[in-house]
Image (cartoon, grey):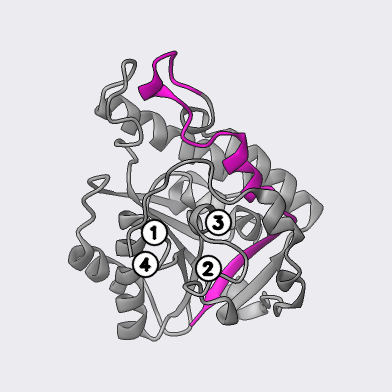
């Protein structure tokens, strides 16, 4: 279900006060995960860092990342950058940010789907060719509320069913529109990824590398930051969340 991302959303203090995450099982990072690199699939540049940047850092960069779109529609009426320029900026930010997590540029693939127009069928085919039985496919939750996030999640789920890969879904915009114990969120499938201090620091640095998103592009309202401090606070926790199949 696509949900409008408006206003300030659920304040991070409400999530921090919620006791449920302390009781979620911890996601196990066994030797199999470290031997076969997980594939992290990001709808837009920065989703991989916001959702599971700490997990990527704890795997010492031992992941492959597929970025589905270039995020060129983040500021559709920008007075500063046309879409093509913003796409190039966001690709470069991805390389910088993922490098801070230990991911080399050759492990990052930009798939080039239109921002806001993901071809779900073509993406499912492409992911099917990259996945193998038991390999982790880590991507946005199919109910996250953003159309690209949900389309990518569905495509990944299809590819996992075809190949026997293991689907792990992470929320991004869910933290904005949902609330603790929200009935539409599959909290019963939640697993907690406890971050080391080093992984958390690396994630925060990687988030900050997306300057086009965390800072205004210019003074016009159309160039305002997409990820202001109240949003970023949701991704500075000492743990991350994934939903298991």
Residue holding disc 3 = 175
Q: Which residues are magenta?
A: 216-245
- Percent across and percent down for residue 72 are 30, 36
> Residue at (34%, 40%) from the top-left corner?
71
| Residue 149 shown left or right of residue 174 in the figure | left
Task: Kindly report the distance in space between the C-alpha atoms of the residues bearing marks 4 and 3.
Answer: 17 Å
Q: Along the line of sight, which residue is nearer the eye, 33 or 177?
A: 177
Residue at the far right in the pictured view: 197
Residue holding disc 4 = 153
Q: Earlier in the sequence, mark 4 or mark 2?
A: 2
Q: Earlier in the sequence, mark 4 or mark 3?
A: 4
Task: Kindly report the distance in space between the C-alpha atoms of the residues bearing marks 1 and 2.
Answer: 28 Å
| Residue 14 shown left or right of residue 129 in the figure | right
> Residue at (72%, 64%) from the top-left corner?
18
Q: Are marks 1 and 4 in contact (CB under 8 Å)?
A: no
Q: Earlier in the sequence, mark 3 or mark 2?
A: 2
Q: Under tag 1, what secondary structure?
A: loop
Residue holding disc 2 = 37
Q: Earlier in the sequence, mark 1 or mark 2?
A: 2
Mark 1 or mark 4, which is nearer to you?
1
Task: Kindly report the distance in space between the C-alpha atoms of the residues bearing marks 3 and 1.
Answer: 10 Å
- Percent across and percent down for residue 238 are 75, 56
Q: Along the line of sight, which residue is nearer the eye, 226 or 161?
A: 226
Label 2, residues with CA under 10 Å away: few <14, some 14-19, many ≥20:
some
Query: What is the number of the mark on residue 145?
Result: 1
Q: Earlier in the sequence, mark 3 or mark 1?
A: 1
- Is 224 magenta? The answer is yes
């Amino acid at each position: 279900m696509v949900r409008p991302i408006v206003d300030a959303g659920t304040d991070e203090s409400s999530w921090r006060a919620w006791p449920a995450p302390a009781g979620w099982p911890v996601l196990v990072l066994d030797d199999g995960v470290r031997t076969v690199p997980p594939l992290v699939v990001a709808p837009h540049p920065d989703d991989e860092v916001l959702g599971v940047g700490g997990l990527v850092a704890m795997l010492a960069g031992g992941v492959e990342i597929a970025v589905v779109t270039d995020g060129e529609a983040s500021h559709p009426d920008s007075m500063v950058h046309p879409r093509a320029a913003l796409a190039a900026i966001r690709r470069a930010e991805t390389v910088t940010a993922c490098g801070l997590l230990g991911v080399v540029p050759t492990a990052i693939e930009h798939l080039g789907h239109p921002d806001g127009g993901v071809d779900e069928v073509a993406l499912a085919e492409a992911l099917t060719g990259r996945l193998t039985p038991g390999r982790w496919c880590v991507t946005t939750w199919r109910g996250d509320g953003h159309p690209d996030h949900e389309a990518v999640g569905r495509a990944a789920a299809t590819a996992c069913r075809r190949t026997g890969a293991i689907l792990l879904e992470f929320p991004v915009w869910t933290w904005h529109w949902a609330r603790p114990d929200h009935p539409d969120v599959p909290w019963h499938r939640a697993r907690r990824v406890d971050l080391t201090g080093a992984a958390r620091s690396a994630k925060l640095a990687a988030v900050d590398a997306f300057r086009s998103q965390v800072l205004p592009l210019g003074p016009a309202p159309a160039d305002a930051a997409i990820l202001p401090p109240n949003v970023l606070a949701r991704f500075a926790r000492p743990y991350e969340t994934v939903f298991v199949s």
